[in-house]
Structures are given as C-alpha cells and as structure tokens.
Image: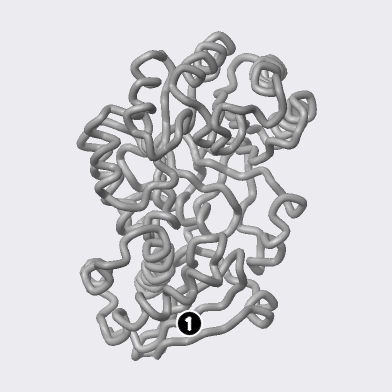
Amino acid sequence: MKIIKLETFGNEFVTFTRVTTETGATGWGQLSTYNADITAQVFHRQVARHAIGTRVDDMEDTLNLISEREHKYPGSYLRRAQTGFDTAIWDLRGKLAGRPVVELLGGTPGPLRAYASSMKRDITPMDEAARFVKLRDDHGFTAFKWRVGAECGRGLDEWPGRTEEVIPTVAKALGDGIDKLVDANSCYAPARAIEVGHILQDNGISHFEEPCPYWEVDQTAQVRAALDIDITGGEQDCELSAWTLMIDRHAVDILQPDVMYMGGITRTLQVCAMGARAGLPITPHAANLSLVTMCTMHLLKAIPNGGKYLEFSIEGLDYYPWQDGLFRNDPYRIVDGHAIVTAEPGWGVEINPAFLDNATYQVTQ
C-alpha cells in the first residue's frame, strides 16, 4: 500500500500531519511542538518528498532512507519533522488493523499511572504546594514533579532562595506515600547540583531531572556518582549517539526520551531497547497535552522497561493557550491518578475540525 499524499495543518505551536494511501486510507500524526511552522517547512522539503511513493509497511526503512538522503542535516529539526511521518503511519496502521497502537507495540490498553507535572517557576512555593494538594485530593495523583533552579540558569535560581524554600514546602504539604520528583532543566554545575541533591534526599525526593547542562554528560555522571537518588535525563537528545554516550558514561539512572523530539515512536523504541540492554527504565518526557502525551501513553503500556509513571502536564490555557480546541473530545481524563490508554483504533483521538479549518495548510503529493 503506497503513500500518495502527506499534509500538514497547524501554526507555530502545534502542527498535525495526515498521511493518505493509494486506497484512500488515512492516518493522523503530529510534528513536534514549538516552532512547528518551521518544522512544517522541513517536513515538506526534507521528509515528505522522500516518503511519497513508499509503502506503509516499509516505514521503518523509509525513516532510515530519509536520514541517509538528508545526512548533511542531522539534528533536532529533521527529527521533529520525521515525527510527523512516523506518528501518522502508526495511526494509519492501527486503523487498518482495527486496533490501538499500544496493541501493535505489544501492550494492552487501560489505566496508566501518571505524575502531575508542573511547568512553572514563576509560582510561589506555597501556591505550588496548594495546587498539588488539590490535585492529589481531587484527582488521586500519587506522584508530582516541580521545578528547581532556573532553566539553563548557570547556577542561578528563579529568584534568590526559591529552591531552598520550594523543596521542603511542597514535600511537606504532599506528605508521605507520594512520589516526589524535581526538574532542574540544566541549571547547575556539579558542585551546586550535588548540594541541591542532598536537600532533595533529606526531603524524600527520589527523582532529580537534568541537574547539569544536558550536553555535559560527564557533569551529570559526576552528580549521579555522588547521590543516592535517581538522576534522570535525555529529553533534549534526538541522535542515537547521544544515548550511547549517556549510557556508556553511566550518567543517569532513568532515560527520558521525548517521542516528538526523537523522531517518533520507531526511533524512540530504539532508545527503549538500548535502555533495556543497560538495565535502565524509560520514563519519557511529555510536557504538554498535544498528541505527544497520547503517543507516550501507548508506548509506556507496551515496553518491558517502562518507568513507574507517565508525565502528565497540569498546565492549562493560562500557560499553553494553544492547547485549546486541539481535539474533538478530551482524551486526557485522569481517574484515580491514572490516564486511560484507549482501545480505539490508532491513537484513538480525533483532531478538532475547527482547528483544521483555521490552520495553515501545506501538501506534498
């Protein structure tokens, strides 16, 4: 079954893709979020033109062919564009088989434990604690992640003293029986990261994400060697060589690929297999409620070394106004702290026609 048309519908924040075969069958996917309008240009110029005329069953080889044909352009934008092809083909395959993607990957639909993930640093420690407690009580979340330091902050805090205040304030408010995670987003040099890590240990936090600049793998390995809690990372990395280096240097305890940054499900599965061989669990990055979280849900329910929980963004339209109206129905309900992986064919979601009507449209056929 050959691919005859690849389309994009979107804006600068999020762009959906649609693949059409010679039989008229279709599947929906998504480019990675953020600067998605630029990624759409890359998609049509450097991905779609190589994919047109290839067979649906040959998608994995086609992805390799794209990398070979575009060998002078490795890196983030090519991978973000490839994601639009990969995720649309997986949706198409599911629809053709009448099965959800999770089953095509070897898993089963159903509930998946989620952790409530805060993206905010401009929130006071008391306000962060209060909204976490409400989410715990109202939706049954049993795990939470919040932010320390400043994003790529060169050792600085969002404001002086915030890190030392937010760690114990939130940890105490949540109480016992809750998994607690923090994310430094590449803030610290090793010495400061280790200092913060000891504060985390003292307050029962078990997960310290991206403590050092993610590109400084040896710095992260130094922090891991000095602390007893899990050091995690990998969300930014999109080339397989980076994962090899991270694993070989024993830099992290948990690998965190992002399906959309990696180039789709197929390339993310390669990282999952690398982690399995190294005895490392996979807790993917999924920081918004576009299609990335749904794709991650299907993946996590299928891989043998899936981590303890799904990252689930708690930020609404005040933080991500572009999330409004992406899907016809809300696919992201939380029941007793669990997201629900659908049994519907493909990804099991329907893009909102109103979004498509107002989107920038491009086609390669």
Task: Return the residue at label 1.
Answer: 7
Task: Farthest residue to the top: give it.
Answer: 202
| Amino acid residing under circle 1 | Glu
The residue depicted at 63 percent of the width and 33 percent of the height is 141
Left or right: 347 as drawn, with respect to 332: left
Residue 9 pos. (x, y %): 56, 77
Query: Relative to residue 195, is residue 171 drawn left or right?
Result: right
View extreme (front): residue = 154
- Camera-nearest residue between 293 and 181: 181
Residue at figure coordinates x 42%, y 87% from the top left: 364
Circle 1 crowding by C-alpha within 10 Å: few under 14, some 14–19, many from 20: many
Marker count (numbered): 1
Q: Quadrant of the N terminus?
A: bottom left
18 is higher (above) or lower (below) than 23: above
Q: For the C terminus, give its image quadrant.
A: bottom left
Q: Secondary structure at mark 1?
A: strand
Residue 68 seen by the camera:
yes
Residue 62 at x, y = what percent?
Answer: 25, 72
Residue 250, position as x, y percentages in the image? 28, 27
Q: Quadrant of residue 274?
A: top left
Residue depicted at 51% across the width and 71% down the height: 38
**Residue at the image point whose x is 43% and y is 47% from the top:** 236
